[in-house]
Amino acid sequence: MKPQLTTIETVSDQLFACVYNWSHGRPYTKSDIDKALLAHRDSTTRYGRLAARLKEIGEKTYEQLCDEGYLNTDADKAIAFRREELESLAGREELKSWLTDVNRIARLFPEGAVTAKKTKLPLSRGSDGFNVRQSYIIKHFLPAQSFCGIYGPSGSYKSFLAVSWACHIASGQAWADKKVTHSSVLYVVGEGGVGVPRRIRAWEQATGRTADNLWLVNRPVFPVRPSEVDEVLLAVKEVEEKSGIPVGLVVIDTLARCFGGNDENDARDMGAFIEGCDTIKQKTGATVLVVHHSGKDEAKGARGSSSLRAALDVEFNVKREGEGKALILSCTKMKDAEEPERKAYDLTTAELYEDEDGEMVCSLVVYDKPREPNEVEAELASVSRLTDNHQALWQAVRSRTAKGDPCTIPVIKDDLKATLGIEKVRKSFHRWLDKLESENIIRVEGEYLTPLVQHARH
């Protein structure tokens, strides 16, 4: 008795091409499926049944393909459905071996019609790009196409600073001897009134220049709403058409007035605000500068959700120097460059016009010549070689003690991390604490901290 020979069926190139295309969400050609049927005439074999089924599918209408799940607005879902049916006909391992047969794929698709899917993420290798020059709209202060913020308490002159920056950029005049990129500026006057136009006029009188490329939006704008973002984009386009100069800065003054009635402390609401600002930045190429208020405890930074600070590329704190007409500007975050030094800037009075009662209407303008700050906490006036970090530590301890809150080393560390940064606090906290303890400013008892001097009330 002769042994019975078993024929081993091999898949044809045409059937392989049909399966490969179909399993990747693409159609196969009528020519390929017809040739596959000729190669696998026996419909009782596995490959014969597969070719016959693909022939049936290829004759379906577009509506039938959609109804049966072969086409879907969710492409991944449609592909998964197709592969599930192919596995039932060819076998899971067989299908897997076909889809990973790189030599056959390269031979059947030599022109790269089927290529490996590549990421849309921007990739670079190692230190590539380390020497790329960073662009600024105010060198060392405001990077180009960035998300920036300045914050401080009411009466700290933060809006006067924002107007000063805007005027210098709009006129192309250096600020604090730092180069600016001459650009148009769109300034959202969220708090309304005549304050901002008067501050601009005061700057023009003080400098002898005009700020014709500074344009005001005289109502709040709410970046949490897509329709409002679209209006900003239209305004930017109109300003660029009228001025002939690209918009390099969009100022939102203030966050509170442009938050749309949402909760500043809610991370989701703040996330929507950040997303709107990012859209403005990305679609205009401009830097977005948000003017914001500090919280009740200045040592804890800006008011509201900490997600805002996390999203900012640059952040500045503005505080008033004593009771005089001067502000102190401190950089609390500079993501990709060295932080500029903490400096004070004086404000001068400009007489604008006489009103109908013969009284002079005035405004203030920032004199952009930096100097060393003169203000020191009254309780720390006798301490030599004092830094901003020592003052921040003292303010945090004093604030918690005054409110009757727990005042321990771990708690104060957490407070300072929000404003000074985790790494700086980790490295230097105990050195700052030792300094204040040795000066009899703070008493350390185990983990507990107690202020030893009374807060001077002004």
Image (cartoon, rainbow, N blue to C red):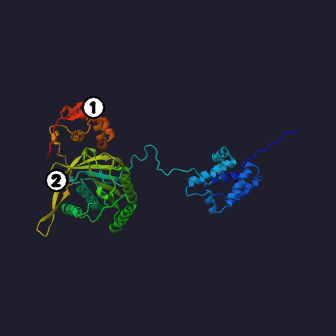
- Residue 448 in the image: x percent, y percent? 25, 33
Q: Assign a secondary structure to mark 2.
A: loop
- Residue 68 in the image: x percent, y percent? 63, 57
Of residues 228 and 161, which is closer to you in this image? 228
Q: Is residue 310 left or right of residue 117?
A: left
Q: How packed is label 2: few (under 14 Cα within 10 Å), some, or many (20 or more)?
A: some
- Amino acid identity at mark 2: Lys
- Residue 409 in the image: x percent, y percent? 28, 34
Q: Residue at x 35, y 53 (%)?
A: 146
Q: Please identify the quarter of the rendering in which residue 243 is found.
A: bottom left
Of residues 212 and 238, which is closer to you in this image? 238
Residue reaching furthest to the front:
404
Q: Is residue 22 left or right of residue 170?
A: right
**Quadrant into which the N terminus falls:** top right
Q: Are marks 1 and 2 in contact (CB under 8 Å)?
A: no
The numbered mark at residue 247 is: none
Q: Is residue 422 left or right of residue 329?
A: right
Q: How packed is label 1: few (under 14 Cα within 10 Å), some, or many (20 or more)?
A: few
For residue 83, say whether it is visible: yes
Residue reaching furthest to the bottom:
356
The numbered mark at residue 325 is: 2
As measured in the structure, the alpha-carbon distance from the residue carrying label 1 to the one carrying label 2 is: 40 Å
- Amino acid identity at mark 1: Glu
Of residues 184 and 280, which is closer to you in this image? 280
Residue reaching furthest to the left:
358
Residue corresponding to mark 1 = 447
For residue 312, say whether it is visible: no
Mark 1 or mark 2, earlier in chain: 2
Of badges 1 and 2, the one in the foreground is 1
- Residue 52 in the image: x percent, y percent? 72, 55
Q: Assign a secondary structure to mark 1.
A: loop
